[in-house]
Every structure is written in structure tokens, then in C-alpha cells.
Amino acid sequence: MRHLVAQFLSNGISRRDFVRRLIATGVTTAAANSILESVTAFAQAPGAPPASPEALQIFQGTGGEAFAEQLMASGVRYVFGNSASEDAPFYDALVNRPQLQYILTPHEGPGAAMAAGYVKASGQPAIVMQAGVVGLTNALGQMFNAWKEQTPLVFYSYSTEDSLAAGRDGFEELPNQEQLAAPMSKFAWSASRAEMIPETVRRAFRVAWTPPYGPTYATWHGDYTGERFTAEIIRHDQVDPRMRVRPNPVEVERAARLLVDAQRPVLIVGDEIYKAKAFDVVVELAELLALSVTQARQVHTNFPHQHPLWVGDFPGGRLGSLDYPTDPDVVISIGNKLQHNSPAPVVSRGIPFIDMRNDAASMGNVMTTAAPLVSDVAYGTEDLLAAVTDLLTPALRARIAERYAEVEAVSARARELRGLVSGNPLWDASPLEADRVTYEVAQWADRDAIIVNEAGSVKLEHSFSFDPRGGRELFYYYGAHLGSGVGTAAGVQLARPDRQVVCLVGDGSFIFGPTALWNMARLELPVTVIVYNNHAYGGPHNRAIANLGGGGSLVDASKYVHDYLGKPDMDMASIARGFGVDGERAQNVAEFRSALARARRSAADGKPYLIDVEVARHGPGWAEDPWVPTVSRL
């Protein structure tokens, strides 16, 4: 039994093989499944990482062994990496350390996305490894995503050159390669001596996991991993500042007074709510004040969509684009690092703005703040809730009750309008409307499914209703570097094996990162991947025309050189089969529903499945036969 458990925890056997071998020893099927769930729960429980039992130990061995020991002490269970010969001493160290599971990823980009998905879904640390600077450059796109999304992911790649040969323009050498990562990481450092490997590693994890979260990067000369030395291995809790800050009480009182006096207050929710699991207290604050609740572009949904105070996402990056209220008199943002994509700020200067989040460095850079609340959003909302409660009088409560009824009516009407999508005259057409694909997925998916969305301009709100408190969850590609969807879905499923994970991805995005399908097949991660395939970069097509004011030479000539992906059409199901994932193409509703049924059966067997759906193109300028630049036409 102990041997089987060790094999399972070290990723030596799959969940299915673990159960099968238990049954072969005489254990009943029910007992085997119970043991599986117990072992899985233990392995994934917060606070149960494979760290060394000692808070501090003196270690003697190779740099590769010290690297592995410090990773365990830092709470790491999974190492996501692409093959790298200079890391051979580290691979050798893993043989006798089954607590560290190495997940080989065929390409650094999707591998980093998989690691980031695991970190975001589990709340546990992980590291992603690349082969020198050439591997690092492949991973930089996902480092950018982690930087934008404030994901505490640690990156490592060695410096290819030997320490004694550095500076001679050697094979794959780039002097000061850590500078590549510096603009989009909280910490980028090269260990100057072999014995500094453990210190550099634990510093990378400490900085990444200290709010505001973000990626870090560590490197050292390749020969250091083979050197023998003596160094300290220190458990993460001995260096973690455990920073959870309460806001300035003076500013809390100021914010409370602004909110209580407001006639049309708006709450913008953000991802720090998800990370702090502060959903209940934020909902309580919204209900107490009858706040209209909205959200800008974020990774997660941070407020339940069925709640009567939810008025929908605000489009276009400007609060003024909200249907209700169009003229708020106070705005409070909880947990947002808002993206200001125009010369004008998201919230107009004349509106008092309350900003609550843990990122003091960016607070006030663009927005003026009537009440800056630098804090952990769970603590900050608790304090604000108490301050507001103290100020409420019976008359104020009566006025707030009237506002609640008004917002509730607007919210109900918005949900009704979103539900009218099926009135599209092309609803039953083939190729399918993208909205029809989304609708069918929403009807089919589990009530607590996790949706990983990298489907470009595809809208979900007309069919999906998300509730982060136990209903459906969303993982979106806030950072916008393409190719993250499939890898993120694999990492999320690894972290949440008990939940259905569905990946929605556009054909253009899918081509940037399909190699994570191989990881899904190898690890038996039962993700359902649905590709919206219109054989085009539809979003860039429409935005380019809009940027030209609807005209221009390419519009007049119907020569859109930058967006058509047909001739030949890409067969995503065949690509998936090449990576060991079953799949099929669907061209109409009946075929798509049948494919979804097969995907569910595949997931029940612990296997991923891909559906390549033919989707209609829309927007100005699309012809029956889009222009393709062949040699003869050129």
C-alpha cells in the first residue's frame, strides 16, 4: 500500500492505475476510490506541501540537490520544465525525492501557462524551468501574462556558459540574461556563487508570494548545479513576511462617509477578491449599501452574476459606458489594477474614487483617490463594513432600500436582454454562430464547471452565469499573450481534479500553444477543449478596419493580408490526435451536441477531448472567397 501511494504521489502511476492496482490487492472498488480521494485530498491540502520538517537545515551536496531541497522547503510539489542538459544534476536529485514531481512540457510557453494555471487554481507554489536563454525567450510571453495578472510564478533557467568561460560569447550565451526578465518580474537575479542557489531560490519564492503578487526569475551558471558545497536550506514560513495589511482607519472612515452620503454609488470588483476569497464580505458590503456592481477586464469573475445588484461588465474600459448608473457620484474599486487604455482615466476626475487593494506602488499613478485604502481586500472590506454600519440611520437605510429595488430592476432587465441572444435569425445556421456554440456549452457543462476562456472576442455573459462562491468559475486571459488557454486549462485541471474544466479557445489562439494537449493525455487530465474555428483572426480583422475608420486601401481591394487562416483550413482535431488527444470536427448543432456527449464520456474515463467547431465569420469585408496571397497573386 505504501509503495502504491508513493508511486501515485510521485506521478509514477495515474489515478486509474492506482485504483486498478488497489483492487488487484483485494481492496473493494468503493474502498479503492475512497483511498484515492483521501490521498488526493492530502496531497493537495493547503499547508501540506512536501517541505523539509526542519525549519532550517545545513545541507551538503551538489547544487542540483540543494536546488531540489530548497524547492521542497519552499512548498513546491510540481516542477514544470522543458528538457535542459545543464540541469542534469537536478534531474538526478529528483530520483530519490519523489515529493517533487517533474512535469515535462514540450514547449516552454504552454508549459509556463500550465504552471500559472496550477498556481492560480491551487494557491500553491510552483516553478517553471527552461533551458538557458533560448528556453527563456520562449517563456517570456507567459511571464508577461503572469506580470499583468499578478500571478506568483517562479521562473528559472540556467546561464548556458560555464562560470569560468563567461563573457566569451559562448554557445547560447547572452550576458546578463536576467535583464530580459527584469521589466516584467518583481525579482530577477543571478546567483553569483554556487552556494547561493538555495538563497536565490527562496528569495524568488518569498518575493513572488508577498503581495502584490507577481512572477520572479532566478538564474545561475550551468556548472553551479554540479558543484558540491554546504549551504542552509530554510523552510518558507521562516522567511515569509505573511503580509496582510489593514487599511488606514482614517481613510476607512472617509470612505465610509462618502459611500453613505452617495446617491448613485458603484462598486468595481477585481481579482484580489478572488485571491483573498473575500466574496462573502464584498457581497455583504454591496447589499448593505445597495451598490451597483460591475467589473472591468480581469482573470476571474469576482461577484456572483445572479445577484440582483450585478449590472454586468462595463465595456470599452470606461465606466461611463455602463448602462446603469450612467452618472455615478461615488465609485469604489476593490481589488483592481485598472487598465487605462485611453488618455482619459477609467473613472472621470470629477467623481470621488475609493481605491482598495494591496498594490500601493501603482495606486495614484493615474487615478486620483479620495480615499486610498492600501490593504488586504478581505481585511479592508471588513473594516469598511463596520465603519459603514456605524453611520447608518433608519432614514439612510430606508433610502438605501429604495435604491436596492431600483438596481434590482435594472439587473433583472439586463439578464432578460442577455437571454435574447437566441433570437438571432442565424441561430440554427451552419457554420454555427459563435454565440450558439457558447450557449450549447453552457447548457451542457456542470453547474460548478471551471471555464478557461481564450476565445478572443467571443462573449460569454449571454449564456454563462458565474459564481465564484461554489458555482461556475472563470479563468480569462487578462494578460492577452496568446497561447495560454490550453496550458492554463491543463494546470487548472491538475490543481482541481474533482471539477470539470472546459477550455474555450479561438483557432488563432489555439495555434500558439497546442502542445499542452500532450500533457493532458500523458497526465490523464480530462479537460474538454472547444476550438471556435472560423479560419481567421476575426478580432484583428474587425479592429483593423475600425482603426482605419472603416475605409482604406485594404478595404477597397478586399485584401486582408493579416487575418485569414484558411486555404488550407487547419484541422484542429487532427492536431489534437497527433498529441494523443481524441477529438472531432463539428459543423452543425446536431454534430456539436453529439461531440459534447462523447467529450463527457471521455472525461469519465479520465481522458481529454477536443472539439473543432466550424464557426461563422462576421464583420465588414469578409468575402465568399477571402483573398489569399499565393505566388501567382503576388
Image (cartoon, grey):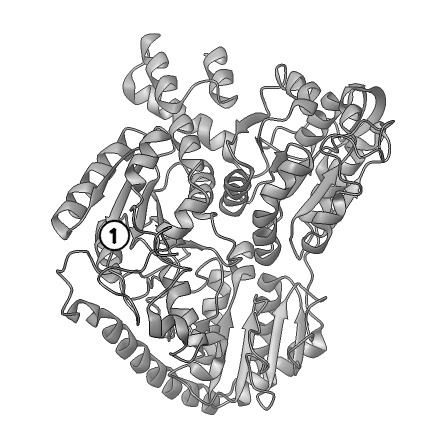
Q: Residue at x 47, y 47 (%)?
A: 483
Picture layout, residue 460 above or below residue 554: above
Asked whether residue 27 appears in the rendered view, the answer is: yes
Q: Residue at x 52, y 21 (%)?
A: 10
Amino acid found under the numbered disc labelled 1 = Val
Residue 625 vs residue 353, the one in the foreground? 625
Provide the secondary structure element on which disc 1 rests. helix
Q: Quadrant of residue 227?
A: top right
Q: Residues within 10 Å of mark 1 (few under 14, many from 20)?
A: some
The answer to whether 285 appears left or right of 84 in the picture is left
Picture layout, residue 511 above or below residue 419: above
Q: Residue 370 in the image: x percent, y percent? A: 65, 83
Name the residue carrying label 1.
Answer: 441
Q: Residue 31 in the image: x percent, y percent? A: 33, 20
Q: Residue 260 in the image: x percent, y percent? A: 54, 86
The answer to whether 250 appears left or right of 388 in the picture is right
The answer to whether 318 appears left or right of 193 in the picture is left
